[in-house]
C-alpha cells in the first residue's frame, strides 16, 4: 500500500520506486500488479494508469539519456 501511495504521489517509475524502497523492480511490479488488486482494486487501477503512462514515455526518457551521454562525451 505504501509503494502504491508513493507511485501515485510522485508518478515515479517502477525503477525509481524500487530504488527508493530498497527492493527490486520485480518486487515493486509484482506488488502493484498482482498483490495490490486483491487488497485494494481501486488503488490498483489508479497505479496502473501511472505505470501505463510511464511505459508510454519510456522511449522518450531513453532517448534523452542517450543524448546526454553523447553530449558529455563530446565535451
Image (tube, rainbow, N blue to C red):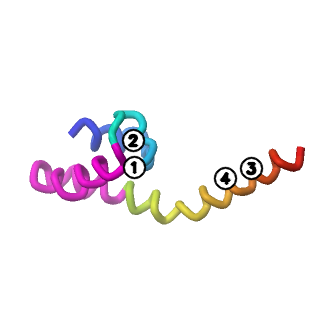
- The x and y percentages for residue 18 are 38, 42
Q: Secondary structure at mark 1?
A: helix
Q: Is residue 20 visible?
A: yes
Q: Tell me the CA gap for discs 4 and 2.
A: 19 Å
The residue singled out by tag 2 in the image is 17
Write down the residue under mark 4.
Answer: 65
The answer to whether 13 appears left or right of 21 in the picture is right
Dot 1 or dot 3: first in sequence order is 1
Label 1 sits on residue:
14
Q: Residue at x 58, y 64 (%)?
A: 59
Identify the secondary structure beneath mark 4.
Answer: helix
Neighbor class of circle 2 (other Cα within 10 Å; few <14, some 14-19, many 20+) is: many
The image shows residue 24 at horizontal and vertical percentages of 35, 45
Confirm or deny contact between disc 3 and disc 4 (CB under 8 A).
yes
- Residue drawn at point x = 28 percent, y = 48 percent: 27
Give the side of residue 53 with respect to residue 33, left or right: right
In magenta stretch: residue 66? no
- What is the span of residues highlighted in magenta in the rendered image? 24-49
Residue 2, picture quadrant: top left
Residue 68, numbered circle: 3
39 vs 52: above or below: above
Mark 4 or 2, nearer chain start: 2
Q: Position of residue 75 (x, y in %)?
A: 89, 43
Q: Residue furthest right?
A: 75
Residue 55 point in image, percent of width and height: 45, 62
Badge 3: how crowded within 10 Å, few (<14), some, or many (20+)?
Answer: few
Q: Of label 2 and label 3, which has the lower sequence position?
A: 2
Disc 2 is placed on an element classified as helix
SS category of the residue bearing label 3: helix
Amino acid at each position: 500500500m505504501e509503494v502504491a501511495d508513493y507511485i501515485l504521489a510522485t508518478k515515479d517509475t517502477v525503477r525509481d520506486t524500487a530504488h527508493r524502497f530498497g527492493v527490486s523492480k520485480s518486487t515493486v511490479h509484482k506488488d502493484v500488479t498482482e498483490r495490490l488488486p486483491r487488497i485494494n482494486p481501486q488503488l490498483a487501477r489508479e497505479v496502473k494508469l501511472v505505470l501505463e503512462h510511464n511505459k508510454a514515455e519510456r522511449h522518450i526518457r531513453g532517448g534523452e539519456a542517450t543524448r546526454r551521454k553523447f553530449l558529455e562525451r563530446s565535451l
